[in-house]
Image (cartoon, grey):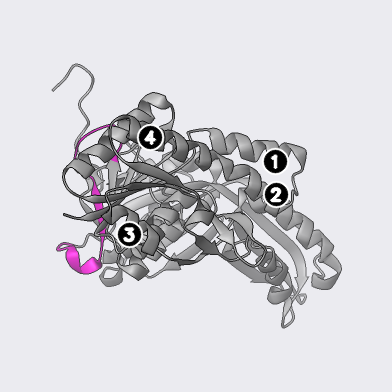
Amino acid sequence: MARIVMKFGGTSVADLDRIRNVANRVKREVEAGHEVAVVVSAMSGTTNQLVKWCQDLSPLHDAREYDVVVATGEQVTIGLLAIALQTIGVEARSWQGWQIPILTDQAHGKARVESIDGSLLIERMQAGQVPVIAGFQGLEPTRNRVTTLGRGGSDLSAVAIAAAVKADRCDIYTDVDGVYTTDPRIVPRARKLDRISYEEMLELASVGAKVLQTRSVELAMKQRVRVQVLSSFEDKPGSLVVDEDEIVEQPIVSGIAYSRDEAKVTLRRVPDRPGVAASVFGPLSAANVNVDMIVQNVGADGSTDMTFTLGRTDLPRARDLLEKEKATIGFEAMIADPDVAKISVVGIGMRTHAGVATTMFKTLSEKGINIQVISTSEIKVSVLIPADYTELAVRALHTAYGLDGPEPARRGEG
């Protein structure tokens, strides 16, 4: 008998038939003798609609009220799934984040989980009940307000709950059947990975891979929660996210990721003096705007151009903040470009192999793709390019690093 947390994303619970399918999958695990808790997202498209309503009313809306609105999607799903499970003879009960409780900090819209008491969930699971838990939401205890964990936050909820209840495994069910070397919709020859290290998965998630949310992988690595990515619609083996020691042969490059959710900001002619970077990034950090790639070019006249990237949805807020701080920072002009994409090459084998970055730069050059910004880490190289070249870049790099698998069978063949 194992203790398992099963997480189902929005496409897995998109309508009543799919919710019934999820209920049957949960029942199979219960009948196999396992203790099961389930974490679910809102039904596909629901959160996008809720977010749009908030943005249409006010682009700079109150983040606390935003959380009240967008947290409602998961509440609907947990009630429906609990009913579906009860209908097929599985004892189940729905749980919202505040009922457990999942306690978070005060960063509304991007809250961080601070603590979860899993004792009551364990008690219910041991008694044979399946807790059906709303992902994506928590409780900020000092003001007793609902919080949300950011887009994709249901993955984080699932991993955090798995750690809290000391689960043997956290199964993430989604619309893909595992972790691939890149997006199969762009590269049909992309290969599914049987295993991938926490570190590689963290890098891929942080630079655009949509399979798992970044903070969920970070927490899984910290708490050593074994995570399995599986398809909600097919019964086939998935991909395990595990410790690096469990991977026998470490490839130089494991995957290519991309993100079109980027925006680039350039501050022209910023005074080149101590503390100027803090005056730029301090207000952004205080407003929970995450900055990624940063480049600074110092001119001969004592000024500097400062370029950085951030999430496209944060661009209006960032521009507003920087305009208010213009006199303090002293920049001459601000240029914003939302039409960019970040392409990243990731692999733990980079630690022991040279030339990975050179291959990337040469491949993009041969395709006529201009690189705007470069950043690196021990197992990753990322570049910022014009968004129109995203698919061409991903295909070219996937081939250049030898990641192409066999040509998939066409319909009617094989």
Disc 2 secondary structure class: helix
Q: CA distance from mark 1 to mark 2?
A: 9 Å
Image coords of residue 56 (percent x, y) = 73, 37
| Residues marked 1 and 2 touching at CB (< 8 Å) | yes
Q: Earlier in the sequence, mark 4 or mark 1?
A: 4
| Residues marked 4 and 3 touching at CB (< 8 Å) | no
Q: Earlier in the sequence, mark 3 or mark 1?
A: 1
Q: CA distance from mark 4 to mark 1?
A: 25 Å
Range of magenta residues: 231-249
Quickly name the residue at label 3. 122
126 or 325, which is in the foreground? 126
Q: Residue at x 30, y 71 (%)?
A: 351
Residue 54's label in the rendered image is 1
Residue 93's label in the rendered image is none
Q: Crowdedness of circle 4 by 10 Å Cα count: few (<14), some, many (20+)?
A: many
Q: Crowdedness of circle 1 by 10 Å Cα count: few (<14), some, many (20+)?
A: some
Foreground mark, 4 or 2, reads 2
Disc 4 secondary structure class: helix
Quickly name the residue at label 4. 12
Q: Amino acid at mark 2?
A: Glu
Q: CA distance from mark 4 to mark 2?
A: 27 Å
Asked if the stretch drawn in magenta spans residue 248, the answer is yes
Image coords of residue 309 (percent x, y) = 60, 58
Image coords of residue 359 (percent x, y) = 35, 57
Q: CA distance from mark 2 to mark 3?
A: 32 Å
Q: Compared to 351, does 213 lie above or below?
A: above
Q: Crowdedness of circle 3 by 10 Å Cα count: few (<14), some, many (20+)?
A: many
301 or 413, which is in the foreground? 413
Q: Earlier in the sequence, mark 1 or mark 2?
A: 1
77 or 334, which is in the foreground? 77
Q: Amino acid at mark 1?
A: Cys
Q: Earlier in the sequence, mark 4 or mark 3?
A: 4
